Image: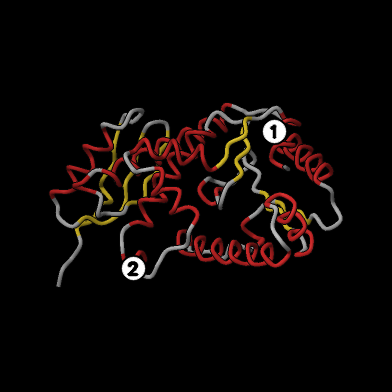
C-alpha cells in the first residue's frame, strides 16, 4: 500500500521482487529456484554450498539494472543492502506494533487471529535468518536504514507524504553524477554475475568494482590459469573497456 502510494505521489516506477526474479533468471537460473531462495531461509546443507554468493550476484545485477535510470521504488526483501548509500538512494524501513500487523494480515490475507500471529512470526523469523545468511547482518538493525517509520501513530498517507518530501529534499533531480555511480554499480554487478554463472569460474568468489568502464577484480583463484579466464569473462561483458586482475591471488595449499 505504501509503495503504491509513493509511486503515485512521486511518479516513479514501482519494482517488486517478481520483477527482480524475472530479470535475474535471464542469467540461466530458474525463477522457481530464485524465488525459493528469496522467500525461504537456507537449510543447514545449503549453508555448505556456493549458493549464497551466486544468489547475491544475480539479484544484485538484476536490481542494479532496474534502478540505474533512477526514479524507481523497490519494495522487496533487504534490497537496500545490495545498493550503495548516498543522496540518490533512500533506504526506508516500515515497522508497526503487533496488533496493527495482525489486523492487516487478517484483512489482506483473510486469516484468523491465530493464523495471522503464526504467519507474522514465521515471516519475521525467516527474514531474520535469510538476511543474516546472505548479508551477515541483523535485519532489524536501524543503522542499516536512512529512515525508520512506525505506523502505530502515523497513517499510510502521512508516511507517504513524509517519504516523498524527504526524497525531494535529498535528491530534487537525478543528476548525471548519480547516474554514473549507478552505472558503475550495474557494470560491476554484471561482471560478478557473469563470473558466478560461468562454469570455469563459478566455484570462485570475487569483489568487483567499476569506474567509467574500468573494472577491477579482487579475490583468490584456485590456479594461476584461472586468472586468464576471469579476465576473458570480464572483457566480454558489455560496457567493459579495461580489466585489472592484478589483485587476483592464487590460493596457497599447504
Residue that mark 1 sits on: 7
Residue highlighted by disc 2? 45
Q: Residues within 10 Å of mark 1 (few under 14, many from 20)?
A: some
Give the residue at x 35% y 56%. Answer: 51
Q: How is the image coloured?
A: secondary structure
Q: Secondary structure at mark 2?
A: loop
The N terminus, quarter of image: top right
Q: Using the image, determine if residue 153 lies above or below residue 24.
A: below
Q: Residues within 10 Å of mark 2 (few under 14, many from 20)?
A: few
At x 32% / y 46%, what residue is drawn? 217
Q: Is residue 168 left or right of residue 27?
A: right
Q: CA distance from mark 1 to mark 2?
A: 40 Å
In percent of width and height, residue 124 lies at 61, 63
Front residue of this view, candidates 64 and 217: 64
The x and y percentages for residue 38 are 48, 52
Q: Quadrant of the C terminus?
A: bottom left
Task: Find residue 178 and report its horizontal and vertical position in percent.
Answer: 57, 33
Check disc 1 and report its element: helix, strand or loop.
Answer: helix
**Picture quadrant where residue 52 is located:** bottom left
- Residue 144 rendering spot, x and y as whole percentages: 61, 57
The residue located at (71%, 61%) in the rendering is 112
In the rendered view, would you say 215 is above or below 8?
below
Residue most extreme to the bottom = 254
User: What residue appears at the point 31 percent right and 54 percent down from the top-left corner?
Assistant: 205
Between 123 and 7, the one nearer to me in the picture? 123
Are the two marked residues, 1 and 2, in contact with CB atoms closer than 8 angstroms? no
* Mark 1 or mark 2, earlier in chain: 1
**Is 44 positioned to the left or the right of 149 in the image?**
left
Amino acid at each position: 500500500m505504501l509503495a503504491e502510494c509513493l509511486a503515485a505521489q512521486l511518479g516513479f516506477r514501482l519494482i517488486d521482487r517478481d520483477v527482480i526474479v524475472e530479470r535475474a533468471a535471464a542469467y540461466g537460473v530458474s525463477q522457481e529456484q530464485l524465488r525459493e531462495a528469496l522467500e525461504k531461509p537456507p537449510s543447514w546443507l545449503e549453508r555448505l554450498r556456493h549458493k549464497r554468493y551466486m544468489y547475491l550476484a544475480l539479484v544484485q545485477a538484476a536490481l542494479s539494472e532496474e534502478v540505474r535510470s533512477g526514479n524507481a521504488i523497490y519494495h522487496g526483501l533487504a534490497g537496500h543492502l545490495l545498493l550503495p548509500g548516498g543522496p540518490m538512494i533512500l533506504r526506508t524501513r516500515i515497522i508497526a506494533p503487533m496488533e496493527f500487523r495482525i489486523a492487516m494480515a487478517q484483512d489482506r490475507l483473510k486469516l484468523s487471529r491465530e493464523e495471522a500471529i503464526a504467519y507474522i512470526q514465521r515471516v519475521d523469523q525467516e527474514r531474520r535468518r535469510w538476511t543474516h545468511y546472505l548479508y551477515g547482518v541483523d535485519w532489524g538493525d536501524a543503522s542499516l536504514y536512512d529512515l525508520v517509520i512506525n505506523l502505530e501513530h502515523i497513517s499510510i498517507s502521512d508516511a507517504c507524504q513524509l517519504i516523498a518530501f524527504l526524497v525531494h529534499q535529498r535528491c530534487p533531480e537525478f543528476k548525471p553524477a548519480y547516474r554514473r555511480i549507478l552505472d558503475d554499480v550495474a557494470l560491476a554487478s554484471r561482471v560478478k554475475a557473469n563470473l558466478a554463472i560461468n562454469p570455469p569460474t563459478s566455484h570462485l568468489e570475487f569483489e568487483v568494482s567499476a569506474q567509467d568502464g574500468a573494472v577491477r577484480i579482487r579475490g583468490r583463484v584456485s590456479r594461476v590459469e584461472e586468472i586468464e579466464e576471469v579476465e576473458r569473462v570480464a572483457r566480454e561483458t558489455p560496457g567493459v573497456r579495461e580489466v585489472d586482475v592484478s589483485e587476483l591471488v592464487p590460493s596457497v595449499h599447504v
